[in-house]
Amino acid sequence: MRILGAQGGEKVLGAVREAAKDAEPAVRDAALRLLCDWPTPDVLPDLAALAKAPPTPAFRILALRAQLRLVPLQAATDDQKAASVREVMRLVERDDEKRLALSVLGGVASAGALEMAAGELGSPTLKDEACQAVVAISERLVAKDPDAVLDALPGVLEK
């Protein structure tokens, strides 16, 4: 599996996807891990499915983290990237993945991203990361949507 993954490409990805359905647990687990380490956003649908129905809790975390790693690499608008993060956030339970999501949102110039980041300002364990994300998004978004930025920044100043 590792050798296949190093080769990459659509043909290899197809083989990895098939191996992820294998009845042999060792083969299936190796393929699922390879999907979670895949370098391109082609696997985002696979990872979303894995996060929703993982064979173990560990695979859920791996799939969520992999999705967050790949969202910025998508050939998509900032609004679409924010929507992708929103989908992932619906499944996130741990603060570690929420921090990662906030980091991703910091690079997205979208009112939706700003809203999600600002929504975490009240979290005692995430407020610092949420503040950083709100500021980073605001810097990118202010020219496009100054009203959204004006609405969000008082929350940062308060925290």
Image (cartoon, grey):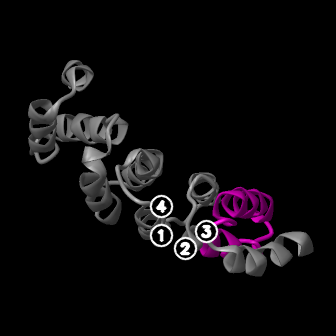
**Is 156 colored magenta in this rendering?**
no
Look at label 1 and name its amino acid.
Arg
| Residue 92 horizontal/vertical position (percent) | 51, 65
Mark number, residue 78: 4
In this view, 123 is above or below 56: below
| Residue 153 horizontal/vertical position (percent) | 80, 72
Q: What stretch is highlighted in magenta?
A: 114-143
Circle 1 sits on which residue? 86
Look at label 2 and name its amino acid.
Gly
Quadrant containing the C terminus in the rendered view = bottom right
Residue at mark 2 to residue at mark 3: CA–CA distance: 13 Å
- Classified by dominant secondary structure, the portion drawn in magenta counts as helix
Residue 96 vs residue 39: left or right? right
Say which label, 1 or 4, has the lower sequence index: 4
Look at label 3 and name its amino acid.
Lys
**Of helix, strand and loop, which one carries label 2?**
helix
Say which label, 3 or 4, has the lower sequence index: 4
| Few, some or many residues within 10 Å of mark 4 (<14, 14–19, 20+) | some
